[in-house]
Structures are given as structure tokens and as C-alpha cells.
Image (spheres, helix red, strand yellow):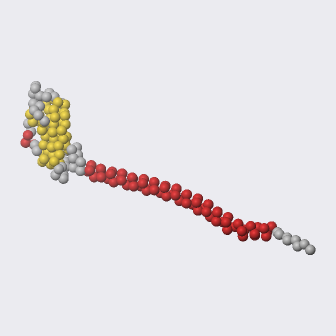
Amino acid sequence: METVIETTWIDCVSSFASTWGPLIISLVSLVLSVISLAQSSKAQKLQNKVNELELKIKENELERIEKEKEAAYYSCVEARIIKLGKDNYRMKVWNSGNVSVRDVTVRFDGDPGIIVLDQEKIPFDQLDPMKNFELVLVTHWGSSRKVKIITEWDDDRGVHQSKMQVVDY
């Protein structure tokens, strides 16, 4: 008598699963791990770029704050010659900076042939921001029409500064 081995599809699946199942699960786990590693690497690169941008933003912010601090202590004294009428001139000296200045002096570079009548105002003790004073000038026929004016002052920190301007009147 022959023995017929009857196998069912459940037995086949069971046999296949017991033999190949752990291998298939391992391969699927390996593929998922590789995908996860790749995405993690991309995320880390993106995070590094974000960190670099944040660092640059912070550096720019610090530079801006430093410039604002410097601008708060900016001092500048300027001078211009103004014609009020025929042979009637004034030199207007003003503080265009952000801090008060002391001991403001103004003079011509060289001899332009212009006389300053209000010499007793110089040096001007204190000149607040956006304030000015005027000096009466006398010119004559041989006066130069283009002159160099040098202003000098001490700022709030005691630093001596100067500025030279070329003025045409």
C-alpha cells in the first residue's frame, strides 16, 4: 500500500514561513534601517545649515548693535560760509553729531584773506547736537572764493577730533 502524503497549502506556507520568514524579516529590517539612516543624514545636514544661518544672523545682529552703539557716540562739527547780502558773510558752525562736544575751534587752512570778527567766541565751550553758532566774516577784493575750513573739537569721551572741508562761497 502506498502512503499518500497529503499536504495542504497551510503546511506549505508554514514550512516556507519557518524557513524563509526570519530571513525576509531581517531583509525588510535592513532596508528600513538604511532608509532611516539616509533620512537621518539629510535631516542632520539640514540642521547644520540651519545652525550656520542662525550663527550668521546672530553675528549680523551683533554688528548692527555695535554700529548703533558707535552711532550713539558719533560726533561731527561742520562749518559753512553763508552770504547774507552784498559783502555780508557769516560762518555757520554746527554740531551734526549725536553727542555734545566741547572746545570747538574753527580756522582756515592757509590765508584765504578772510577776517573773523568774533574771535572771542573761539573756542566755543559746549555745542549740543544739532545746535550752532555763527561768526561774522569780513572779505575783501583779493579773498579766495574757495577756502579750506578746519574744525576741531573734543567729544564726550575726551577724544580730540577734527574735520577739514572745502567751502565755496
Q: Residue at x 15, y 46 (%)?
A: 153
Q: Residue furthest top?
A: 141
Q: Residue at x 19, y 37 (%)?
A: 165
Q: Residue furthest right?
A: 1
Report which quarter residue 112 is drawn in: top left
Report which quarter residue 104 is drawn in: top left
In-front residue for pair 108/58: 58
State left or right for residue 50 relative to residue 149.
Answer: right
State left or right for residue 165 relative to residue 11.
Answer: left
Residue 114 appearing in the image: no
Q: Height in image: 7 above or below 161? A: below
In-front residue for pair 36/81: 36
Q: Height in image: 12 above or below 130? A: below
Q: Height in image: 12 above or below 138? A: below
Residue 75, horizontal then vertical, whole percent: 21, 47
Q: Residue at x 43, y 56 (%)?
A: 51
Residue 44, horizontal then vertical, whole percent: 49, 58
The quadrant of the picture occupied by the N terminus is: bottom right
Residue 1 appearing in the image: yes
Q: How many marks?
A: 0
Q: Residue furthest front?
A: 1
The quadrant of the picture occupied by the C terminus is: top left
In-front residue for pair 143/3: 3
Report which quarter residue 32 is drawn in: bottom right
Residue 39, horizontal then vertical, whole percent: 55, 58
Residue 143, horizontal then vertical, whole percent: 11, 28
Q: Residue at x 64, y 63 (%)?
A: 27
